[in-house]
């Protein structure tokens, strides 16, 4: 067990075998699987996976944990330990075939990690993340909810999302100040016409939610006019939080 936990790296390690088993149960690892684990820490999840599966890549930023991980797993060719920052590492180098992604994420950067990983959707078989409960609630929230926003739209665009269960703060060392939960993301087919369309979708969603209180006819004026919105059965006076992922898709297809 490490003696000092690094707060700036969001280190809250899981030592509770009941919770670990519950997580492995929902992940259902199988022999042919190739995993990418973000932030393995001391291997709480890795330990339960590596006997079962084909290959696992670990991306851990904390260089002080690397000797420990290497010592733990050195004898196995199944495990590739990468000392890197997940926000900087070029995942496309790694993900040549379909990957399963897991991680008990560092909460201080969890939404950044999600925004980064979701665009890899075509290369992903599924994602299982432990996150702060509120972040999971934002991801799964639906139009009309106060917490529905850019994170919900962007994640639901690329994935079917499902909250699986809550996890008590008491099972971590050190104990986090926030509650946790577990989520599964399964890739869905996106219907972008081309790469430019994908870029303009992201731009529109970002701009609309940056001006959350503004009517979309105002915030998106540069991109779409009122008549076009009406022709798409979208009220120009609506606010972004009432628009579905499909509405945003329709808008992005009709930008000026
Ligand atoms: N999976 C372990 C640890 C979870 S804590 C467990 O459940 O016990 C989060 C982990 O993410 C820590 O090991 C931390 O060092 C690592 N981490 C933090 N920021 C990171 C980053 N940018 N890239 C990769 N790993 C990171």
Image: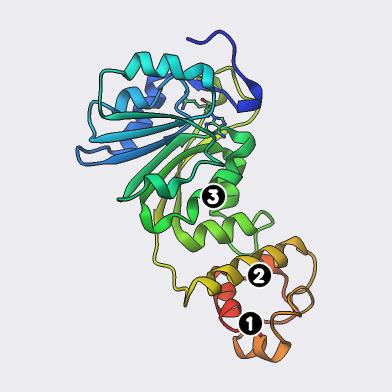
Q: Earlier in the sequence, mark 3 or mark 1?
A: 3
The residues bearing labels 3 and 1 have C-alpha atoms spaced at a distance of 25 Å
Q: Residue at x 56, y 41 (%)?
A: 87
How much space separates mark 2 and mark 1, taking CA atoms? 9 Å
Q: Is residue 216 above or below residue 54?
A: below
Q: Residue at x 41, y 26 (%)?
A: 19
Classed neighbour count for the residue bearing mark 2: other residues with Cα under 10 Å, few (<14), some (14–19), many (≥20): many
Residue linked to disc 2: 204
Which residue is at 52% across, 21% downward? 63
Q: Which residue is mark 3?
A: 116
Q: Quadrant of residue 136?
A: top right
Query: Which residue position holds label 1?
Result: 255
Q: Is residue 72 left or right of residue 174?
A: left
Q: Secondary structure at mark 1?
A: loop
Q: Is residue 250 left or right of residue 79?
A: right
| Viewer-nearest residue: 104 or 82 | 82
Which is more foreground, mark 2 or mark 3?
Answer: 3
């Amino acid at each position: 067990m490490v003696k000092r936990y690094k707060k700036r790296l969001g280190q809250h390690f899981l030592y509770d075998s009941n919770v670990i088993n519950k997580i492995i149960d929902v992940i259902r690892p199988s022999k042919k699987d190739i995993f990418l684990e973000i932030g393995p820490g001391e291997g709480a999840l890795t330990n339960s996976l590596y006997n079962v599966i084909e290959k696992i890549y670990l991306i851990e930023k904390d260089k002080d944990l690397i000797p420990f991980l290497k010592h733990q797993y050195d004898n196995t060719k199944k495990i590739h330990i990468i000392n890197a920052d997940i926000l900087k590492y070029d995942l496309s180098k790694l993900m040549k075939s379909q990957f399963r992604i897991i991680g008990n994420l560092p909460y201080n950067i969890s939404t950044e990690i999600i925004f980064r990983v979701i665009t890899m959707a075509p290369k992903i078989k599924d994602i299982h993340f432990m996150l702060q409960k509120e972040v999971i609630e934002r991801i799964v929230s639906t139009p009309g909810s106060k917490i529905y926003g850019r994170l919900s739209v962007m994640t639901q665009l690329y994935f079917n999302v499902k909250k699986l269960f809550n996890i008590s703060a008491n099972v971590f060392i050190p104990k986090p100040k926030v509650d946790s939960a577990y989520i599964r993301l399964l890739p869905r087919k996106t219907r972008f016409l081309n790469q430019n369309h994908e870029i303009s979708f992201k731009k529109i969603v970002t701009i609309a939610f940056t001006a959350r209180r503004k009517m979309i006819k105002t915030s998106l004026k540069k991109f779409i006019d009122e008549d076009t919105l009406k022709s798409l059965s979208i009220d120009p006076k609506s606010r972004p939080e009432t628009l579905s992922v499909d509405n945003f898709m329709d808008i992005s297809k009709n930008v000026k």
